[in-house]
Image (cartoon, grey):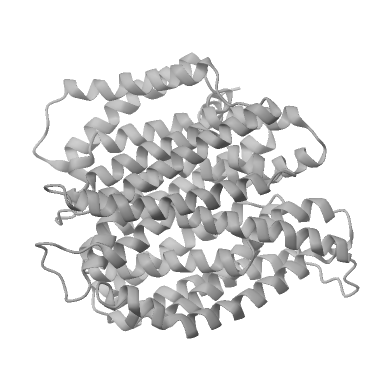
Amino acid sequence: MGIVAKQSIYNTVIIFAGAFLGAINILFLFPIILPDEQIGLTRILLSFTVLFSQFVSLGSQSMLVKFIPIFRSNFAYKGSATYIFKISVIGFIVSCLILFFGKPIFNHFYLENSSLFIEYFFYLIPLILFQLLINYLSGFLQALFKSVFPLFVNEIIIRILQTTILILFYFSFIDFEIFMLLFVLNYAIASGVLLLFVLIKKYFKINSQNKISKKEKTQIIKFGFANTLTGLAGNLTNRIDLLMIGSIVGAVGISTQDNNQGLYYITIYAIASYMAALIEMPARALANIASTFVSKAWKENDINTIRSLYKKSSTNQLIIGLLIFIGIWASIDNLLIITGKDYSEGKYVFLFLALAKLFNIAAGINGKIIMLSKHYIVITYLTFSLAIITFISNLYFIPLFESLPGRCGIEGAAFATALSIFLFNIFSFLYLKLKFNLQPYTLKTLYIILFGLLSYISIFILDDFSNNYLDIILKSLLICIIFIPLILLSKVSTDINDLFKIIFKRK
């Protein structure tokens, strides 16, 4: 088994463990412990944090992944790591100025419908600072082929800390003000752990001579600017739905705190969206390590390695993602009421987003391949165009779905986001096929989809159980009992077969 497969396995284990902890937090503890408006507050703060940290740092994480492998043979990475860090520092100063002078604009859009967010608005400043550090250090370690530890910090440590403060709040050891301070502190701890790891391992080298040339600085800035537009547009495509819900979706007929109807619906949307995001877990595990190898392959013009990664990423991601999708959809009604609160309005939010994400992971690492090539500007144009389409389609579909009987508008946001994801992958597929004759699909793709359909149909032999937990467990077990053996026996993925051999210690 190759290094990509091995590190992807480690990353997958960490990501799924993190997903389990995240599910406990977001699907169970948050709804049980906090009012919906306060849950919505945490989600909108994190969404803006991600957007700002991507924008103001010029995408430092991607710049490190792109250029550290190129300069690694030189002393201190030829000063590239230090130079990119300076960009992040400048970016943080810019973000502080934007937030300070731009607060009246946020008031205009959110004060009426999400007033609690305005009350905690300046919590964004420390959150952005710590997220910038996390992004930088994670990208730096990823570029050195050390992707496992930063993933552990982001997926495990942060979520354990969140669980801890939720429990403290539940037992009244802290009030909500202290809870929010500790919520921010979680990210400070995560960035501190990553920094300590880098210093102890002596990975970071200070280059006082700063040997990076003016031409190379221009290359970094050019890539960073294009990547920023790409990352910002991509994050807007994925998060603008939630941000617009907080601003324009009203809570018709719902009893909530005054001026926080938007945060209430953000909570429903975030829970359904998180369940859909679980489908992308295997894609994230592979992308964290594969990006570095794709960058190296482009440098060496090794198109065969890229072709292999493209096909394997599609196959492996589809297998795991499809299993997660049918497992959740088989029990979606139970999952949305399991905490005692009724979040059933999020059912079709999940369906729209889940189908889009399933299509996205089945397309493999198409975006990464283009972004790390010399044609990266194509992704910039594409994602920026799709961000505009997403914004316009949200403006259209949210009111459209809100006007339908029994709908509240959040389904329209999900539909608009799903539409953009479909368009992105269709254009990326066509570009790679026409430009490089690369495409990820084989006959195995059809087999995997067929196995998924057979597994889902099988649950209809079971009667529904009055106990929600028992119903979820039995349906999930039946799906796994049918799907997993079909995948192993058909040998559609050598990586997954090798993984099972390792688990059961077979030679």
Give how far across and how far down residue 166 sits, in percent. 31, 69
The answer to which of 412 and 60 lies nearer the viewer is 412
The answer to which of 193 and 91 lies nearer the viewer is 91
The answer to which of 47 and 411 lies nearer the viewer is 411
Please, is residue 289 above or below residue 134 in the view?
above
User: Is 379 left, or right, of 445 in this rendering?
Assistant: right
Give how far across and how far down residue 10 sits, in percent. 57, 43
Quarter of the image that includes the C terminus: top right
Number of marks in the image? 0
User: Is 433 left, or right, of 100 in this rendering?
Assistant: right
Q: Residue at image x 45%, y 18%?
A: 446
Location of residue 94 (image quadrant) = bottom right
**Residue 163 appears in the picture as rendered:** yes
Please, is residue 223 above or below residue 109 in the view?
above
**Residue 122 appears in the picture as rendered:** no
Q: Residue at image x 21%, y 62%?
A: 32
